[in-house]
Amino acid sequence: MWRLKISQGGQFVRTCRGYLGRETWEFDEQLGSSDERATVERVREEFSLNRFDKTQSSDFLARMQLAKENNFDIMRKKTKSQNKKGGVEAAVISLYVTESFNFLLLEHQKEIRRYLYNTQNKDGGWGLHAGCSSCMLSTSLGYICLRLLGEEAENEKLCEVRTWIHDHGGATMIPSWGKVWLAIFGVYEWSGVNPLPPELFLLPFLPIHPGRALKFIENYMQYEEENSRYIWVSGLQKILENPSGDFRRYFRHITKGGWSFSTVDQQWPVSDCTSEALKALLLLSDISPDIVGEHITSERLYDGVNLLLSLQSVSQTCLYKVRVPKLSSAMCRKRVLVRHT
């Protein structure tokens, strides 16, 4: 069975805050009784069969584990958890072309296959996220991913995928980003990808030389990965410091005082998350610390306000360069609360 590890380390897991908020799944073949394993399989099968009518998994496996650890009834309260679609296809292709496929244990491969089938649309394709209309990018990469994971071409579900691809003009209708992935995998000619004129490499090593650009991109990607601890967006946590080094060189903004759309290790602040978190903390500051715990300090409050103001647009009513009502509303409510503290 799979075990959810909360705020714990693990192989290849990096942290700058003691794994605070980190959630990772680890497979343990000895975990769980025969009844518990049977329950898990039953729930999985029921979700797969009814996934178009009930699109939320309700985090059953996580709730089942937490209920056992904390001695409460798992059916007492049900939650809704939307099934999100990430970049698993690209990750699998990358592992294959870099000859690192052995990092995927058989149980990992099984769960990736289950995940892809559970997010497949009725028409046979996949969208950019679960519930989204099918598109050529996600559908073509999803097909390749499943074939790499050992699924046979005659599989009924894969036949549906090929039918969708053929009915929509074939895999060559994939956008440029997808053409790059297909070329990397070796099923599409590089000549079909919009190229960088090779003559540029014959120039002296000037600032516009593509070799210089490639080196900068390499450093840029490494900087981003290390500063985000190789984490994609997920939970919600406060950031206590700015990115390391000369972060403006890599087009990063200040982060200190903000809340990310992930754990604190990921360090990509979001104005909406920051506004809502500050609003909640300011409301809690009106309640006794004996009930809600220690109040947020003025310094940390000011850090959050400073981040939000740094993201303010010219109109002074919203954040970023375009008007986003939700962000503006959260910001306005937060301003009112700040004035009353």
Image (cartoon, rainbow, N blue to C red):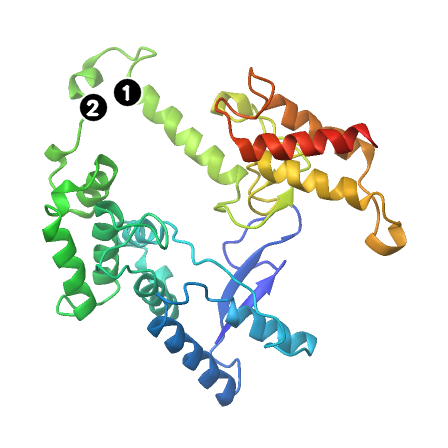
Outermost residue, bottom side: 34
Mark 2 and mark 1: Cα distance apart in space:
9 Å
Q: Which mark is residue 210?
A: 1
Percent position of residue 40, x then y: 46, 79
Disc 2 target residue: 196
Let me know if residue 95 appears in the view.
yes
Q: Quadrant of the C terminus?
A: top right
* Residue in the foreground of this view, choosing between 93 and 121: 121
At which x and y percent is residue 296?
A: 80, 40
Determine which of the numbered discs, if any, sits on residue 257 in the image: none
Amino acid at circle 2: Leu
What residue do we see at 37% from left, 54% from top?
Answer: 130
Type of amino acid under label 1: Pro
Q: Quadrant of residue 119?
A: bottom left
Kindly identify the residue that appears in the image at 16 percent across and 55 percent down.
164
Q: Position of residue 67 (x, y in %)?
A: 63, 75
For disc 2, the neighbor class at 10 Å (few under 14, some 14 to 19, many from 20) is: few
Please tell me which residue is depicted at 26% across the width and 57% down the height of the picture. Answer: 145
Could you tell me residue 300's position as x and y percent?
76, 34
**Secondary structure beneath disc 2?**
loop
Q: Is residue 307 above or below residue 124?
A: above
Q: Residues within 10 Å of mark 1 (few under 14, many from 20)?
A: some
Answer with the quarter of the image where residue 174 lies: top left
Label pair 2/1, CB-CB below 8 angstroms: yes
Query: Is 324 in front, or is 194?
Result: 324
| SS at mark 1 in the image | helix
Q: Nearer the viewer, mark 2 or mark 1?
A: 2
Whether residue 243 is visible: no
Vertical comparison of 182 with 37: above or below: above
Q: Residue at x 19, y 45 (%)?
A: 182
Give the side of residue 39 with respect to residue 330, left or right.
left
Q: Nearer the viewer, residue 45 or 187?
A: 45
